[in-house]
Amino acid sequence: MFTLRDRKLADDILSQITNANVHLKFMHVCGTHQDTLIKHGLDVLLQKCGIEIGQGPGCPVCVTTPKEIEEILLLAKHGKTIATFGDMTRVPGVTSSLQQMKTEGCDVRTVYSIEDALILAEKHKEKEVVFMAVGFETTAPTTASVLLQDPPLNFSVLCCHRLIPPALQAILQMGEIKIDGFIEPGHVSTIIGTKPYEFISKEYQVPQVIAGFEPLDLLMGVWMLVRQIQHGKTEVENEYVRAVKPQGNRKAQQILKQAFEPVTVKWRGFPMIPRSGLRLRKKYESYDARKKYEDELRKLAKEEFADPMGCLCGEVLRGLISSKQCPLFGRECTPENPVGPCMVSNEGNCHIQYRYMKK
Amino acid sequence: MCLAIPGRIIELDKKKQIATVDYGSGTKRKANVSLVQVKIGDYVLVHAGFAIQVLDEKEAQETLTLFKEMLSQEEG
């Protein structure tokens, strides 16, 4: 019921886009959208219809900064038990990676959900468990929900959650590339709804469509953007109506707001983006790893860390180049031996390009 | 990261906020339902062990028809 496949309909959508006779550049901000685009060859089909579509900063692991990685590495070094999602353990930092530190005897656990990290802390009261929380609005409520359940005091969170709408605004303000429309991430939108995107259409006159993840969802999303442009409209439309309600998930929003407050943070490849990150509210600061381990982390406080030498993940994340334009792509940088995070994460542009290129 | 999988709730422990979700083909897993209001039989999207939204069955069934209507309106 939730799988949409109809070849004729896909042909009809593409034919209408072709007939529109346009040359447009769209950006999406989701690794799952990128996967659908490349896996099904939609990028090539759309290019033939005059539509160029690429991924922006839509990979939470990729936008996590080198400094945040150094923070978690330092906590691992200080004997904490680190729990995080699989991709995160493989991202190379300046000094090491979590995976590397595990081979050197540090306690690093890969988890599927924050609940696995919580269970670990409950079972092992002698361990100081730090969950490295990455992810956008889709994932942040899961962290918030656990914080609100009074977790044990040997559990804490290194919060690296980020918010999508401020990043979209940053891209437009930087003005490095022309963007004729945004395909917005369906699952982020299940939480936030349609309203948080509206200021972008109003202030920057950019049309937006929230889209699902089936090939037809994406084609329809592109078609809806083209239609808006043809009719001179700049609105937020919702293609993914079976999952995204205009008001989003109010319960999740409320839980999120109870646990976190917005904070200005850096994204990999970007300068500081106002109110684009989340910080634990004062009430929950005993679970905030940055507060709890302030002494251990102090030596990093004033340090800044550069991206790996020659790595163009920043340019890829800002949509300035495609992965294949990076001189390291597929040579020095491969999924087996990644230089930058975009080649590590399953949601990373470079990893996706490489994965399907090899088939 | 933002990958979410649809499944149907077949068991629900409201007190513990835990549901058993059937993803089809014999795959069943527990999911936390603290972020949603659900009942047995609902379809949910599950992300990182949490149900994040209830799916609208009617909308899902009508999606393709809706797409076709939108396209034909534009043609007309």
Image (cartoon, rainbow, N blue to C red):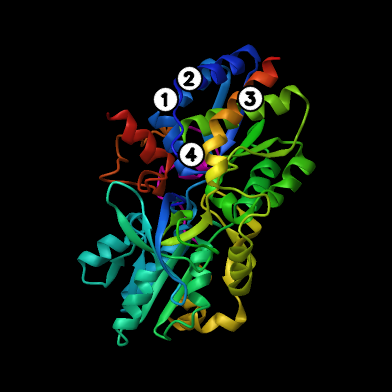
Say if labels 2 and 1 share a chain: yes
Of helix, strand and loop, which mostly describes the magenta segment? loop
Question: The residue tagged with tag 2: helix, strand or loop?
Answer: helix
Q: Amino acid at mark 3?
A: Glu
Does label 2 or label 4 sit earlier along the sequence?
2
Residue B11 visible in image: yes
Residue A36, magenta (yes or no): no
Q: Nearer the viewer, residue A335 or B49?
A: B49
Q: Which residue is mark 3?
A: B69
Say if labels 4 and 3 share a chain: no
Residue at x-position 56% and y-position 20%: A13
Seen in the image, is A53 located left or right of residue A224?
Answer: left
Segment tinted magenta in the rendering: A304-322
Q: Give the mark toward the camera: 2 or 4.
A: 4
Question: The residue tagged with tag 1: helix, strand or loop?
Answer: loop
Circle 3: is it few (<14), some (14-19), or many (20+) Cα within 10 Å?
Answer: few
Mark 3 belongs to chain: B
Circle 2: is it few (<14), some (14-19), or many (20+) Cα within 10 Å?
Answer: some
CA gap, disc 3 and disc 1:
25 Å
Q: Which residue is mark 1?
A: A41
Say if labels 3 and 1 share a chain: no
